[in-house]
């Protein structure tokens, strides 16, 4: 019984004692006596300027099944084209810009643009287009009239697909300990 009490007492004393720790982080290093006049960084790279990649897609599409449009990015027959890429710009004063795009010009694609000064402000623009194809060349004796399915004397032919387009804008501002942001987006579905 006394052995169990001693372990419990020891655990309580250890938990109640102040914790001692040392911080060996780079920002706490003593650099007062270091001679940096001859220092050269052999691994440092200059990140100022433009970098990235851009690709252009061009081709011909001949789709007999609308579901293939979900994979190809469009079910339109004929010549197709799109732009994709990721480009960044930085300068020494802290200004940054970025442009990203994926299959821009197709039914399924997006673009993101941002610019600003690091730690001060940032402007963004987003565009996203998504179209999903369920079936094509559907025939029905009904048509849509003010939210109601109405019988028709003739057969109507149509495609089943959903299209969503989303556009967004954003602004962020930071000053000392204060910050503010505004974001707006609008989405249309058809």
Image (tube, helix red, strand yellow):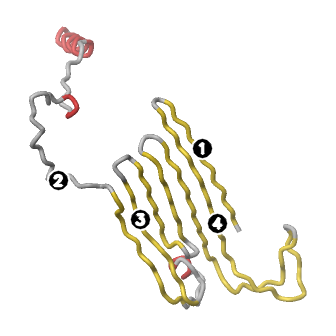
Q: CA distance from mark 2 to mark 4?
A: 46 Å
Considering only order in the chain, which callout, 4 or 1, is on the residue closer to the N terminus?
Answer: 4
Would you name the residue on which mark 4 appears?
A: 164
How many angstroms separate mark 1 from mark 2 (CA)?
39 Å
Separation of disc 3 and disc 1 at Cα?
25 Å
Distance from the alpha carbon under mark 3 to that under mark 2: 24 Å
Q: Which residue is mark 1?
A: 182
Judge left or right: residue 30 versus residue 190. Answer: left
Q: Residues within 10 Å of mark 1 (few under 14, many from 20)?
A: few
Residue located 24% across and 14% down the image? 18
| Image quarter hosting the N terminus | top left
Q: Residues within 10 Å of mark 3 (few under 14, many from 20)?
A: some
**Residue occupying image coordinates x 15% and y 49%:** 41
Q: Which residue is mark 3?
A: 86
Mark 2 or 4 closer to N-term?
2
Callout in the foreground (2, 4): 2
Q: x, y (%) of residue 62?
A: 55, 91
């Amino acid at each position: 019984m006394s052995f169990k009490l001693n372990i419990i007492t020891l655990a309580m004393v250890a938990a109640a004692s102040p914790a001692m720790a040392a911080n060996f982080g780079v920002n706490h290093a003593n650099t007062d006596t270091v001679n940096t006049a001859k220092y050269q960084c052999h691994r440092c790279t200059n990140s100022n300027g433009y970098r990235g990649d851009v690709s252009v897609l061009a081709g011909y599409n001949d789709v007999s099944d609308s579901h293939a449009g979900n994979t190809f990015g469009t079910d339109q027959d004929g010549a197709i084209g799109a732009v994709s890429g990721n480009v960044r710009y930085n300068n020494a004063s802290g200004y940054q810009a970025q442009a990203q795009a994926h299959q821009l010009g197709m039914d399924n694609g997006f673009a993101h643009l941002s610019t600003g000064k690091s730690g001060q402000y940032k402007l963004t623009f987003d565009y996203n287009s998504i179209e999903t194809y369920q079936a094509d060349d559907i025939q029905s004796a009904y048509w849509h009239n003010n939210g109601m399915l109405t019988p028709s004397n003739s057969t109507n032919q149509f495609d089943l697909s959903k299209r969503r387009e989303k556009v967004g804008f954003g602004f962020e501002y930071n000053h000392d300990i204060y910050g503010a942001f505004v974001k707006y987006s609008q989405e249309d579905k058809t």
